[in-house]
Amino acid sequence: MKDKIKALAKKRNAVILAHNYQPPEIQDIADLCGDSLELSIKASKTTADIIVFCGVHFMAETAFILSPDKTVLLPAPDAGCPMADMVDPVALRKKKKALGGIPVVTYVNSSAAVKAESDICCTSANVIKVVDSIHAPEILMTPDRNLALYAASRTSKIIHLWEGFCPFHNTLTAGDVIKAKTAHPNALFMAHPECPPEVLALADEIQSTSGMIRFAGESAQTEFILGTENGLLYPISKAHPKKKFHPASEKMVCPDMKKITLENLFDCLETLSGRITVAEDIRKKALGAVQRMVEL
Ligand code: 13P
Ligand code: SF4
């Protein structure tokens, strides 16, 4: 199946992008694995005719926003992000108005329609840089409350929160982390900024998924506890085979990230199904927010 996918991708001039949480066999076959920022940058620069996005819906949508002349395919079209569904454009417009039209920073984990209502996007890798780039004392951040609280703790801006969260990162507790640290006393604890503040307070390092992979390579430490979705265990162990990685909790599994299989990847390449598009008026408005982030 892997050989068949590779051959078909070559024939169709398709690039296969995979997020760091994807199943191992999908990461192994991808042309590029990465965090949301790396994948957005790659999607904006590729010369392929087809982008096959092994991730969730908002990621494929972001690729289409940046590259509308390309065919963007999501092998499992029902792979969504529950956090992205916690904000909609009507509610966002209402809150923006109530706050006097302050700038809106939107996490890429959001729909194109929400991005279209936003001034700039951010990811977990660049949130501080994006917030600092805004020339206003107050901003509204959507949809992730924990990411916004993290940014508020690292910048001088007044940040208004949206009550969204990742159902998996948000379930990690300080108790879980203490338990993992007790079991692995020599390990350093890395956390994703989607985790709650009490978890981030216990972190030795706060990073995006690719940031964690890089940090583990640069650190003299040989053992780490990962406070993120457990799919990261595969690429981080592959990148650093001599180092040890432990999940902070077994419950950190995002089922939507596991919906892509070799079979549906092959099918979508063969039939060009699972096509993701965005209406042109929304795409144009969303492009401003995504492009400002990519340029920064
Ligand atoms: P990053 O890989 O950008 O850190 O994002 C994590 C995530 O939750 C993607 O859905
Ligand atoms: Fe969304 Fe959380 Fe899954 Fe990422 S891990 S796709 S934020 S639900």
Image (spheres, rainbow, N blue to C red):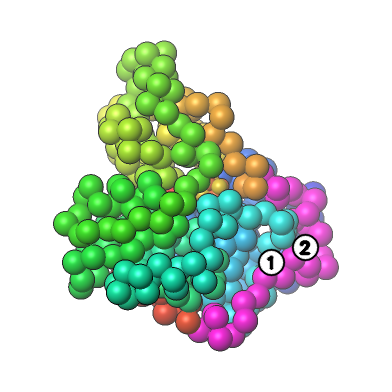
Q: In the visual, does 218 lie left or right of 95?
A: left
- Quadrant of the drawing holding the C terminus: bottom left
Q: What residue is disc 1 on?
A: 73
Decide whether residue 7 is among the magenta residues.
Answer: no
Q: Residues within 10 Å of mark 2 (few under 14, many from 20)?
A: some
Q: Secondary structure at mark 2?
A: helix
Q: Residue at x 56, y 86 (%)?
A: 281
Q: Tell me the magenta residue range.
A: 258-284
Q: In the visual, does 220 lie left or right of 223?
A: left
- Contact, CB < 8 Å: mark 1 with mark 2? yes
Q: Nearer the viewer, residue 109 or 236?
A: 109
Residue 87 horizontal/vertical position (percent):
51, 61
The answer to whether any part of residue 283 appears in the image is yes
Residue 36 horizontal/vertical position (percent):
47, 57
How much space separates mark 1 and mark 2, taking CA atoms? 7 Å
**Quadrant of residue 254 within the rendered picture:** top right
Q: Is mark 2 within 8 Å of ligand 2?
A: no
Residue 279 horizontal/vertical position (percent):
62, 81
Q: Secondary structure at mark 1?
A: strand
Q: What residue is disc 2 on?
A: 268
